[in-house]
Image (cartoon, rainbow, N blue to C red):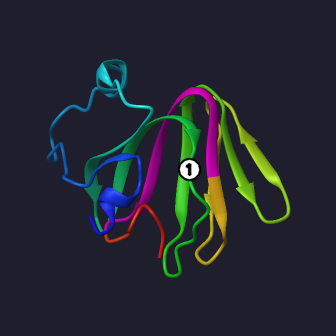
Amino acid sequence: MSNAQSYPYETRLNILFKPLEVIDEKALAGACAYKWYNQTLCQVNQSVVRLGVVEGDYHWHKHDADDEFFYVIEGQFLIDLEDRTVELTPRQGFVVPRGVLHRTRAPKRTVILMVENAGIIPTGD
């Protein structure tokens, strides 16, 4: 990933599971020791599903050509937009449209799934 060293996040873009393999999100999240972890789980058509185990703040950024979908499994996830903050709790999701400046935060350890274009740069354009 470009600029991986300039951000304090553990971002893994390799696809961990192939089609027809069982994905155990709970085991992966439970084994995670990082404060901000992002692992690509699988690819579905031209999109990827990523697991995030997060605590703390991500930086402000945007994606000029790609939408992002966030879905909370456990914890509390905040998405700061320029004019408001969206709070997500378990079983809630939200789409940040392409081109929208945003920052994500988690006041406590939170587990999320993200669906986005396989070519997206997680840290923004």
Total marks placed: 1
Q: Label the magenta part by its dominant secondary structure.
A: strand
Picture residue at 38% right of the left edge, 69% below the top:
120
Q: Is residue 117 magenta?
A: yes
Whole-percent x, y for residue 5 in the image? 31, 57
Query: Quick check: 33 left or right of 59?
Result: left
- Image: 93 above or below 27: below
Viewer-side residue, 72 vs 62? 62
Please provide the residue range marked out in magenta.
104-118
Instruction: Report x, y in % for residue 79.
Output: 68, 50
Identify the image quadrant of the N terminus. Answer: bottom left
Seen from this angle, which residue lies furthest front?
Answer: 6
- From the top left corner, tell me how far across and down residue 96 is, in percent: 63, 63
Q: Residue at x 49, y 74 (%)?
A: 66
Tell me which residue sits at (66%, 70%) in the image. Answer: 101
Q: Position of residue 89 (x, y in %)?
A: 68, 31
* Left or right: 32 in relation to 110: left
In the figure, residue 10 lies in which quadrant?
top left
Q: Secondary structure at mark 1?
A: loop
Query: Which amino acid type is marked by label 1?
Result: Tyr
* Residue identifier under label 1: 58
Looking at the image, is 47 positioned above or below residue 112?
A: below
In depth, the one of 62 and 58 nearer the eye is 58
Vertical placement of residue 24 versus 77, above or below: above
Residue at the right extreme, as displayed: 83
Residue located at (15% from left, 37% from top):
21
Q: Is residue 15 left or right of residue 65?
A: left
**Badge 1, how many Cα within 10 Å: few under 14, some, many 20+?**
some
Determine if the magenta segment contains residue 107: yes
> Where 95 sits versus 124, above or below?
above
